[in-house]
Amino acid sequence: MPGPKKLDPSSSPRALLGAELRHRREAAGLSQEDLGTPLFVSGSFVGQLESGTRRMQLDQAQKLDEVLGADGFFVRNCAALKKSKYPDHFAEAAEAERLAIAIREYAPLLIPGLLQTEAYARAVFRAGRPTATEELIDELVAARLERAQLLTNPTEPMLWVVLDEAVLRRVVGGQLVMAEALRHVCNLARQHRIILQVLPFSAGGHAAMGGGLKLMAFADAPPLAYLDSLGSGQLLDEPLTVHAHELNYDLLVASALSPGASLALVQSVAEDEAHEDQQL
């Protein structure tokens, strides 16, 4: 069985804390379960802190300094974790996303952020923030495009996306913007960079009608589930809860069109949008 992944402490504040936590815990002769007890968390949660898939909170940092005799190290460095380009409800999920080896996502309304084009992302942010300055919109778009750089790696993370048919039918940013965005998704599927499926309206009721779902798997930490809704989100790690959402995703996949049929449908809608724009 492979050992724990070696973190590069210089890569991020979270990696620094994770590497230091693992070092100090092992030096103290404590298991992850032993250290979890005074923190009132599970051993797997301690493992997630060490691997960098979870964000350390200030109260946890205070307790770790006390238990491990760290002389305030964790509290001093915990503040750096609060700085993020993303909204508070999504920041931890975005950071975990970078460490995932596999991501499975159901998108009910919009093309997922990792797959968005610049014009599509700009239209999404402007629709939600009609009075925002151009500078703020530029910053939001830049952060989203930076996230999408994950896909420049040809193999990891494995990304499997199920798009609700509503994603294809809702024209965001105008027909040309929509056509470009859908073609971008098609290109990623043709390049075998993503697995693409569409959940058609004809599937009727399904297991994830409550909102978006993202599942993340890691090389050296338990999986996480992220539930997305308007202006909020939940990152979940309780094993039974994550397993239940994994089952929900499997049911979505079973009800969705095949990858081949899905690609054909998305391409057809993209062509329709481009044709409609030319007729105007």
Image (cartoon, grey):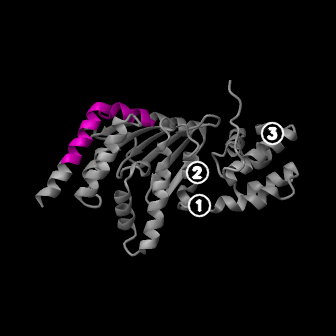
Q: Are marks 1 and 2 in contact (CB under 8 Å)?
A: yes
Q: Amino acid at mark 3?
A: Asp
Disc 1: CA contacts within 10 A as few (<14), some (14-19) or many (>=20): some
The part of the image, by quadrant, that contains residue 48 is top right
Q: Which residue is mark 3?
A: 34
Q: Of all residues shown, which one is farthest toward the top? A: 1
Quick check: marks 1 and 3 in contact, CB under 8 Å? no
Say which amino acid is labelled 2.
Answer: Glu
Q: Quadrant of the C terminus?
A: bottom left
Of the numbered discs in the image, which one, if any, rests on residue 147?
none
Of marks 1 and 3, which one's residue comes earlier in the chain? 3
Q: Is residue 204 above or below residue 108?
A: above
Badge 3 crowding class, 10 Å Cα cut-off, few under 14, some 14 to 19, many 20 or more, is some
The span shown in magenta is 248-271
Give the alpha-carbon distance from disc 1 to disc 2, as whole Å: 9 Å
Query: Depth check: 42 or 56 in front?
Result: 56
71 inside magenta stretch? no
**CA gap, disc 2 to disc 3?**
26 Å
Report whether 144 appears left or right of 189: right
Determine which residue is flagged by label 1: 84
| Disc with the residue nearer the chain's start (1 vs 2) | 1
Assign a secondary structure to mark 2.
helix
In this rendering, does residue 201 appear at all?
Answer: no
Under tag 1, what secondary structure?
loop
Residue drawn at the location 34% of the way across and 59% of the way down: 119
Residue assigned mark 2? 95
How many numbered circles does the render carry? 3
Which residue is located at x 26 percent, y 33 percent? 261
Across and down, in percent, residue 126 comes to 37, 67
Quarter of the image that includes the N terminus: top right
| Residue 184 percent location from the top left of the image | 33, 46
Amino acid identity at mark 1: Ser
